[in-house]
Amino acid sequence: MPISFETIPANWKQPLYWVEVDGSKAGFPRSHMRGLLVGTMMTAQTNTALNGVARPDVPIPIGRQAEADHQFGQGSELANQFKAFFANNKAQEMWALPVAEPTAGTAATGTITVANAPTEAGTIQLYIAGTAVRVGVPAAAVVNDVAAAIASSINDNPNLPVTAVAAAAIVTLTAKWFGVTGNDITMFDSYHGRVGGEELPPGLTLTYSGFQLTGGAGTPDFTAAIANLGEDEYEFVSLPYTDSTTLQAWEAEYGFSDSGRWGWMRQLYGHLFSAKRGSYSDLITWGLTRNGKILSCMGIEATAPSPVYEWSAAYAGKAARGLLNDPARPLQTLHLETILPAKGHDRFNLLELNALASTGIATQRTLSDNVPMISRETTTYQLNLYGQGDDAFELVTTLATLAKLIRNQRQVITSKYPRHKLADDGTRFGPGQAIVTPKIIKAELVAQYAIDAWNGLCENMNAFKANLIVERDVNDPNRLNVLYPPDLINQLRVFAVLAQFRLQYDRGIDTAIL
């Protein structure tokens, strides 16, 4: 019986018509490419009403902002990550990996002092973590009244990452969670200035303990959280922590070793997105210390109002939206909605951005619409194993495209040839037999490559065919070895023009053309 059946027994003798259904040639590649936001939930607040109810270190699906607020605490680091992600991507299946506030951690704090009372009525346009807080001030208000009004307006917005207490003329802000990321919460006023209709009421003076809160200490332990991810796919991960211990743990989980998600055993793949605040010098120095293939960390100016955990989530959200549609298209010009950038005079210039991109830092720019956009989705990878410069994994799109190609190939092989026999090329066997040879598999890979090239993932079919090798292992007759050499399609990232102008073309040339 040459045809290889899967379920109808060869010794079946009952009449008449029996059918088994085989979908091995019908399916198309599908992958469950979830988004994952990693961050601190509120667990240590004395006011239990503020605490989240989620179980720390256990992934949980989140479909709406209200659920994120309930599970992790309204105004928490993780809840506000969801706010930024949903603003940039409303179509992604989203999960969260909440972690408890660090043991023995402390909450970041800061103060706003009302130094002088207003002489006229007006409105304070306060900004807390990049979110506008409007505070109405009557003309007769004294400094204590203004401080009380500021604290009340802050506490009236439960989505803010701080609580406020007024004592005399001083407002003390306290982060809603313990840990170092609370130090990234900013506070200032009148972002848009007089041109934008934002200035303090006449006579009113506010002084701040600093541009950011300070004193937050402690970093979560991600050991149990990473272990609890199991073997589920989480393709786009927002990780707003950039300390070495945290990055080493996550880069190991998403790395290329036997136990990593990009390793040959697990084949889960995925990308890490983060953000880091700092001066040009600080970011260059930090970038030189990293060399991860799957981490893309966006550099933001020291005076950018929005906190890094929101930048990180917005970056992951917009990257996921672009890469899901086409993993090979560059992410440049995709806007990071709801993120407030640094003021114009504080933004990195093109020379600085170019140097940052050359030092493993993903870059962003803000143009006339005052909404930051992705400029170059650089990874932190810069050096090969011998410490020499290498751009093989420089861009997020490289591994995103490669993952798509591998998944497509895996789907074809596992669907069409799940229980086949293996024979040498030239073996004669009956049609319909579940047998493959190296040439049959090679033809299958070439056909799949043609489809991938048609879909804009790769190029140079002839070179691919010439370099593709499919052979039986000389030491194991049940094993096929494949050298798969895709030529990944590239991106239009630089358009360089030499404008070689003339004041007058030679008239003889014009005459000759005519």
Image: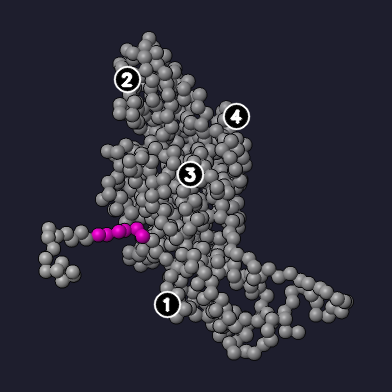
Q: Which mark is residue 205?
A: 2
Which residues fall within the magenta stretch?
A: 492-497
Q: Residue at x 55, y 40 (%)?
A: 100
State the separation of the CA atoms marked 2 and 4: 36 Å
Q: Residues within 10 Å of mark 3 (few under 14, many from 20)?
A: many
The mark nearer the N terminus, 1 or 2, is 2
Q: Is residue 409 above or below residue 504?
A: below
Q: Nearer the viewer, residue 114 or 11?
A: 11
The mark nearer the N terminus, 1 or 4, is 4
Q: Amino acid at mark 2?
A: Thr
State the separation of the CA atoms marked 1 and 4: 64 Å
Dominant SS of magenta comes to loop
Q: Residues within 10 Å of mark 4 (few under 14, many from 20)?
A: few
Residue at which label 3 appears: 88
Secondary structure of the residue carrying tag 3 is helix
Is any part of residue 343 visible from this angle? yes
Q: Amino acid at mark 1?
A: Ala
Q: Residue at x 61, y 45 (%)?
A: 60
- Examine the structure image and report whether residue 53 is included in the region drawn in magenta: no
Q: Amino acid at mark 4?
A: Thr
Horizontal side, residue 149 vs residue 63: left or right: left
Q: Is residue 387 above or below residue 275?
A: below
Q: Nearer the viewer, residue 158 or 184?
A: 158
Secondary structure of the residue carrying tag 4 is helix
Residue at which label 4 appears: 48
The mark nearer the N terminus, 3 or 1, is 3
